[in-house]
Image: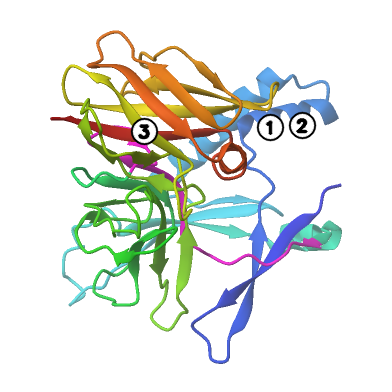
């Protein structure tokens, strides 16, 4: 026989704090589970018969209540109707509200007593209610984990709602090297989603385009502040100026919070300005990296894959329809790049590069 799971949950409305005992369901059972279990214990009743009869029983109970009756199943449950609301006088009309009529279910004491007699309880570790960000997307570029100054950042998750008027609550974007900015322009704030126009703080160097996003809220008036940080890093587009110039300035890419970039764009060929992506994949079989240029849509067209196994100069080829025919890069710290991609980006690191020609 399984146990009944429970865990303590802090009650922030009491001083000093007390703890509630919270039951944690193992799963949710319905008609299908009931039919299977009853048929297993009573083989003369097939699962089809049980699953067909159970909804009929509930429909019969519902009809009895509609007809003004009370339904009592001895040693089990009792169903009856009740009303909410008040009348100003004995002859006043009933309130015009669909919520006025209520259905109540009362469990019989023998039923409860048997559950208490047989149940075994199992304690779970205490967990705190925290904001959880499960995904982020820039709504203009339609790309996950991207911070774009010209778009709207869409956060999804749970327990995200906060009071915008509370100076201690809100959403903060912070650079992994430097810079922190509390956000102020929200399109919507709800428990399961937040939409905001990102105010992206500057970092020490232009290649430092890696950020974290954190939501801080307070669930009760006298509760403590709770913060949740998105487990993945967000990256902002990198501008590549004077592309195609005889001696263009180098642009750091595919880096984190290092004092110098791990990879730099040194040149290339482009017929026009374009925004595209560069991808670095970790190849577990060879323990090396594979780099390629990508279109701006996930699953779209890509340039030829280029194996990279050491520091040095490399040339990436463009893809059909792209204004960029080639991109010259230099890998300056291959070992750190592999470590970054494996440990912080689960094997895939992508940067958006905004190519600007003369």
Q: Is residue 132 above or below residue 126?
A: above
Q: Are marks 3 and 1 in contact (CB under 8 Å)?
A: no
Can you tell which quarter of the image residue 179 is in?
Answer: bottom left
- Checking the image for residue 82, the label placed there is none
Regarding residue 41, the answer to whether it shows in the image is yes
Kindly identify the residue that appears in the image at 34 percent across and 77 percent down.
Answer: 168
Mark 1 highlights which residue?
Answer: 33
Q: Residues within 10 Å of mark 1 (few under 14, many from 20)?
A: few
Q: Is residue 308 left or right of residue 297?
A: right
Q: Which residues are magenta?
A: 122-146
Mark 3 highlights which residue?
Answer: 265
Question: Which secondary structure, mark 3?
Answer: strand
Please tell me whether mark 3 or mark 1 is closer to you in this view. Answer: 3
User: How far from the left and from the top, in percent, is residue 287?
Assistant: 68, 27
Please tell me whether mark 3 or mark 2 is closer to you in this view. Answer: 3
Q: CA distance from mark 2 to mark 1?
A: 6 Å
Q: Residues within 10 Å of mark 3 (few under 14, many from 20)?
A: many
The residue lying toward the viewer, choosing from 231 and 88, is 231
Q: Are marks 2 and 1 in contact (CB under 8 Å)?
A: yes
Q: Residue furthest front?
A: 246
Q: Is residue 97 above or below residue 45?
A: below
Q: Is residue 205 left or right of residue 275?
A: right
Kindly identify the residue that appears in the image at 45 percent across and 50 percent down.
Answer: 260
Kindly identify the residue that appears in the image at 62 percent across and 44 percent down.
Answer: 343
């Amino acid at each position: 026989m399984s146990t009944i799971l429970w865990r303590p949950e802090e009650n922030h409305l009491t001083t000093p704090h007390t703890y509630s005992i919270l039951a944690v369901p193992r799963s949710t059972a319905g008609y299908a589970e009931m039919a299977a279990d009853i048929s297993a214990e009573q083989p003369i009743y097939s699962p089809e018969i049980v699953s067909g009869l159970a909804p009929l029983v509930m429909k019969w109970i519902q009809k009895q209540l509609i007809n003004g009756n009370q339904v009592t199943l001895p040693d089990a449950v009792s169903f009856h109707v009740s009303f909410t609301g008040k009348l100003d006088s004995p002859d006043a009309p009933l309130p015009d509200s669909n919520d006025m009529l209520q259905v109540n279910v009362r469990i019989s004491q023998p039923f409860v007593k048997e559950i208490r007699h047989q149940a075994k309880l199992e304690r779970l570790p205490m967990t705190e209610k925290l904001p959880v960000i499960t995904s982020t997307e820039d709504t203009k570029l339609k790309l996950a984990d991207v911070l774009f100054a010209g778009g709207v950042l869409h956060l999804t998750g749970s327990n995200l709602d906060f009071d915008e008027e509370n100076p201690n609550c809100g959403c903060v974007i912070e650079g992994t090297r430097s810079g922190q900015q509390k956000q102020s322009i929200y399109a919507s704030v709800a428990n399961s989603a937040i939409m905001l126009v990102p105010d992206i703080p500057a970092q020490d160097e232009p290649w430092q385009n890696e950020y974290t996003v954190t939501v801080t809220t307070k669930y009760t008036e006298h509760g403590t502040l709770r913060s949740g940080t998105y487990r993945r890093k967000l990256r902002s587009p990198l501008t590549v100026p004077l592309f195609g110039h005889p001696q263009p300035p180098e642009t750091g890419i595919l880096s984190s919070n290092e004092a110098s970039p791990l990879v730099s764009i040194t040149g290339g060929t482009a017929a026009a300005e374009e925004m595209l992506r560069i991808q670095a994949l970790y190849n577990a079989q060879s323990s090396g990296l594979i780099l390629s240029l990508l279109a701006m849509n996930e699953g779209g067209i890509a340039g030829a894959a280029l194996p990279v196994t050491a520091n040095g100069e490399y040339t990436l080829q463009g893809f059909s329809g792209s204004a960029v025919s080639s991109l010259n890069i230099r890998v300056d710290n291959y070992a750190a790049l592999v470590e970054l991609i494996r440990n912080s980006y689960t094997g895939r690191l992508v940067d958006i590069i905004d190519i600007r020609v003369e």
